[in-house]
Image: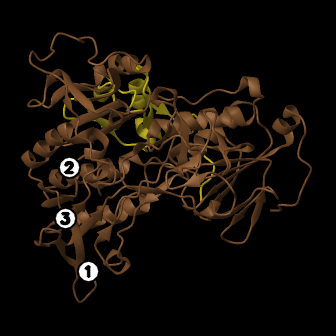
Chain colours: A brown, B yellow
Amino acid sequence: MSGSASESPKSLEAFKTRGRIVIVGASLAGLRAAEALRAAGFTGRLTMIGDEADEPYDRPPLSKQVLAGWVPASHTRLPRARAVDADWRLGVAAVALDRVAKLVRLANGDEVGFDRLLIATGVRSRQWPNPDEAALDGVYTLRTSTDAARLRKALAASPKRVLVIGAGFIGSEVASVCRDLGLEVTVAERAATPLAGALGGVIGAVAAEMQRQHGVDLRTGVGVSALEGDARGHVRAAHLSDGTTLAVDVVLASRGASRTIEWLDGAGLAAGFWGVGCDAGCRAFDINGVVTDNIFVAGDIARSPHVLYEYQFLSMEHWDNAVLGAEIAGHNMVSDETQRRPHLLLPGFWSGQFGINIKSVGVPSFGDEILLTQGSFESRRFAAAYGRRGRIVGAVTFDYGKWLQFYGAQIQRSGPFPPPAAGFDRPADARPVPADFPARGVPTGIPDVVLTGHDPNERSAEYRPRGH
Amino acid sequence: MRIVVDLNRCLGYAQCVPLAPDVLRLKGDEALTYDPNPDDKHRLRVLRAAASCPVQAILVDQLDETEGKP
């Protein structure tokens, strides 16, 4: 593979037939972008670079079907919409980007030249901060299929107590699987409730009640100060910040994810804690806010301004953000300026836990008030809307997903808050209350949707969760 | 074979479940769970299940051979 300066094709048509595209990141976004490029008529050379050895696979099943033991960790490979006819470089990470020479350097010393580049390196789990404790047997994170296989093996060995550190979506889903498997599980969360960062304390209280009714030993407002190993190097105890000590033999650190940006050091792109800044057409910004011509960004690592949220740069670790962002990026990489499309997704996610389907649309954490609009918290069948300054900005449902589109349509048109009545089951006495999101800087897990300010290079978005 | 269900799109109608119960299951009232890489012997049933979905949330592979195998 050579990075030598072959002459770049001049016209778009020449580029589409003879150009070289490199996609760094061979997961959901990378794969869907490759398919979009071929669908748009790109017949040039395509290289897929991924640090994991396996071909692209789906991650959401890992914390559910896989941990439950129904589906092996190796059986979540993604279906293909079309052949991508790529040169696959899997199991080797990209370590540097040279924008002047237009090449990507790989960990094995190879260099891969490109005319256009897609950055889709996503995120990885935040590791337990103490490296000695993180290295203990029985201490896990959950992001990759290898992680899931290891954790599944540990859960199948009937541990006496599992400790989940961090009650975001993944931590809560794992706790749910543990209870399904009949395992004792403690969840330690520094915020006042589970799911606080994503859905606020009002919904978090519903989630807390749900966890406790299912037999989870939920402890909120506490952190884990230290993990202790036995003589064989296996974790045996956790020391909590309230002074208690728990005997545990499996620990999952689920404290959110961090963007895989290290390989972009020195490349001069607007890469930072929340990802790589790009415009609504997926083109990367450089460090001074100048948009690049040939570098595109998609998936979890992308952050781009969103019209619905005051043009703040929105960073989303959502499945459909990867799929739809990649489709737009792929299209735009082989299109003229006037044919380019915007990636303006209304965020949405789901989480199955404790037999309940939790879904959301919009950005709940942009709101400061919440109103129960349908159903009841007690039945755990409800819809609730989030508002800010008289406008609806997000909604959440528990086993009420058929109504989510109604709220999505209201959010898309910046409809009023409280929203017009939906259905016939509006609670008689419901009124807006503070949504109770943790203040910025409160050390909870990193939420998976974040509005990161207006500055493409994030100087104004310094949000550093403290420690763990 | 390989499938993926777009669970943002899925509204929990569960039409698919009785058509391919070894592959698609409902957990609780609304949460769909599934085997992403079921045995090929289920292909016909899965195709019927995918066709039955009112919101077309079940995506089935369009290729017999896939690239990128290690």
Residue at 30% across / 71% down in the picture? A139
Closest to the observer, A337 or A415: A415
**Sequence-wise first label, 1 or 3:** 3
Residue placed furthest toward the bottom = A231
Query: For numbered disc 2, what is the local secondary structure?
Result: helix
Q: Residues at marks 1 and 3, common chain?
A: yes
**Residue A138, image x and y in percent?**
28, 73
Quarter the N terminus of chain A occupies: bottom right
- The residue pinned by badge 1 equals A234
Q: Do the dots labelled 3 and 2 sit on one chain?
A: yes
Residue A38 appears in the rendering: no
**Rendered location of residue A40, percent (x, y):** 72, 30
Callout 2, which amino acid?
Ser
Q: Nearer the viewer, residue A116 or B69?
A: A116
Q: Which mark is residue B46?
A: none
Inter-mark Cα distance, 2 to 1: 24 Å
Bin the neighbour count of mark 3 within 10 Å (Cα to Cα): few under 14, some 14-19, many 20 and up.
many
Give the total of numbered labels.
3
Q: Helix, strand, or loop for circle 3?
A: strand
